[in-house]
Image: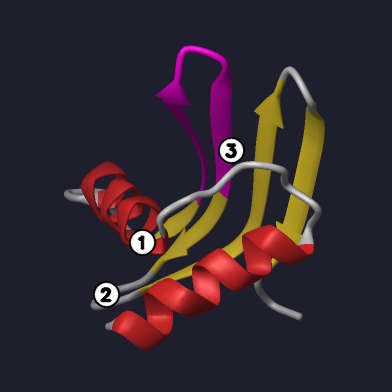
Amino acid sequence: MEELYNAIETKIAESGFPRKVSGEDVYNDICDQIDGKENGTYILLSKFDDDLVFEYHITVMDSEFNLGILKMKCPEGEYETDFDK
């Protein structure tokens, strides 16, 4: 799982996002948000801090999910990374 967490952190950093983010926290947040969701495509919002909002573009499948786009919105600006690239 560490590889996955590191990959999430790397993709976020490559977007130019200026803050440190835990890949494990992002992964766990996604899992919590999709728990019980039917198969389909969703846009989910998560407020990490008072001034930080993550917008996940996720496809939920039977036993897995695909995070396509992650947008991070904070006072420093808006950042986006495409996990499908």
Q: Quadrant of residue 38?
A: bottom left
Choose the circle earlier in sequence order: 1 or 2. Answer: 1
Classify mark 3: residues with Cα within 10 Å, few (<14), some (14-19) or many (20+): some
Q: Which numbered disc, 3 or 1, marks the residue closer to the eye?
A: 3
Name which residue lies at 61% across and 42% down. Answer: 19
Residue 54 is covered by the magenta coloring: yes
Classify mark 2: residues with Cα within 10 Å, few (<14), some (14-19) or many (20+): few
Residue under numbered circle 3: 55
> Does the CB distance between marks 1 and 2 fall below 8 Å?
yes
Residue 37 lies, in percent from the top left, at 27, 49
Residue 41 lies, in percent from the top left, at 52, 54
Q: CA distance from mark 3 to mark 1?
A: 19 Å
Name which residue lies at 74% across and 59% down. Answer: 81
Name which residue lies at 44% across and 22% down. Answer: 49
Residue 17 is covered by the magenta coloring: no
Above or below: residue 85 compared with residue 60: below
Regarding mark 2 in the picture, which secondary structure is present there?
loop
Q: Which one is in front, 83 or 5?
A: 5
Q: Quadrant of the N terminus?
A: bottom left
Choose the circle earlier in sequence order: 3 or 2. Answer: 3
Name which residue lies at 76% across and 80% down. Answer: 85
Q: CA distance from mark 1 to mark 2?
A: 6 Å
Q: Which numbered disc, 3 or 2, marks the residue closer to the eye?
A: 3
Q: In the rendered structure, which amino acid carries the disc numbered 3?
A: Glu
Q: Which one is in front, 3 or 28?
A: 3
Residue under numbered circle 2: 62
Q: Which residues are magenta?
A: 42-56
Classify mark 1: residues with Cα within 10 Å, few (<14), some (14-19) or many (20+): some
Indicate which disc residue 39 carries: 1
Regarding mark 3 in the picture, which secondary structure is present there?
strand
